[in-house]
Image (cartoon, rainbow, N blue to C red):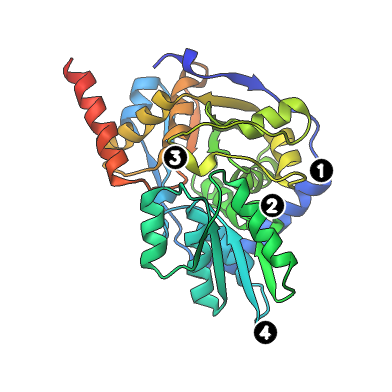
Amino acid sequence: MSSDNSKDISMAGNTSAEIVAKIHSKVCEAYERISPNIHKTRLLPSAEFSKKFSCSLYLKMEHEQRTGSFKLRGAHNKLSQMKQRKGFSVVTASSGNHGLACLDAMNKYGIVGRICVPENIAQAKRDKLTKKGADLIFHGTDCNEPEVLGRKMAAEDEDVEYISPYNDEDIIAGQGTLGIEILADLPSLQYLFVSVGGGGLMAGVAAYVKTVKPDVIIVGCQPANSPVMLESIKAGDIVEYESTQTLSEGTAGGIEPGTVTFPICRDLVDHWQVLTEDDIKWGIEYMWRTHGAVVEGAAGMALAGARNMAKEMSDKVVGVVLCGGNIDSATLKTIMADFNRTSDA
């Protein structure tokens, strides 16, 4: 549980005020629009964590969302505004959760579409998509490759619109509605931990939270095997980064150049945590053992980030977004078996 397993880098700078103000306004509009079609997930106090680490920790249980992740918010915000017309369809790209969310929204609003996914998509997410009748296109092994294909398909057909999993203001605004719920339930919030991949969740949540309560310290969490957003921020622009396999596959892989999420993540995230695979395993195991909750790697990663910053958060009010729960059962069993072996040793 040593903080040596993470990096904590202060990167806060001057905010891109115009972009942030626009996203904040869109988040408020999105909440009114999508509230009837999403769950207001629980904000659960974690008594054991709070006692052990001398803080007041609250878990935003977004893995309990209908499709198993926060992505439902952005998908419903985007697709509910799209005009239906004869012959019109959408195409999107996803490592799983965004695809499940878009499929849910497509069914709700009578829109047809296809979902580009990596060939190595997590089995649990693949099975859920297939069971729900998704029209899947398998392409590449990095999440950026299906995105490139999806954009190409839309560019070649004027009746097809591409839905980005993160580089879209309406998608970002939908994800940001999490921030509204968190501050409404926990106005005393002082620290907030959010997992970051392409940055859609972080951009929406940060734009809302920092506008309403700018003193909240926002911490972005990324896997050591794929810290693409952080490496891009350090470089000053989106960079290519050779990622390796991680339990936090929902936050792994390349980021589209020019994404609107980049300046928001660069300017509004106060600290970054880079978590090892052991950190991520700990977060998954902790949620199962302590709360009986099944969470995926990206969610466990955010909780591990909070643990690794526990010393500086003494007596503080802390929130952790548990962004998803779509984890392979075999992966969960392996993690639990490894933990049990370590505990018995």
- Percent x, y for residue 286? 32, 32
How packed mark 4 is, by other alpha carbons closer than 10 Å (few <14, some 14-19, many 20 or more), is: few
Question: Which residue lies at the image location 59% right of the left edge and 20% below the top edge?
Answer: 8
Q: Nearer the viewer, mark 1 or mark 2?
A: 2
Provide the residue designation for mark 3.
299
**Label 1 SS:** helix
Do the residues under discs 1 and 2 have CB atoms within 8 angstroms? no
**N-terminal label among 3 and 2:** 2
Provide the residue designation for mark 4.
85
Provide the residue designation for mark 1.
17
Q: Amino acid at mark 1?
A: Ala
**Residue positioned most to the bottom:** 86
- Percent x, y for residue 305? 49, 27
Q: Nearer the viewer, mark 3 or mark 2?
A: 2
Question: Which residue lies at the image location 46% right of the left edge and 46% below the top edge?
Answer: 120
**Label 3 SS:** helix
Provide the residue designation for mark 2.
167
- How far apart are labels 1 and 2 at the CA level? 18 Å
Q: Is residue 71 left or right of residue 89?
A: left
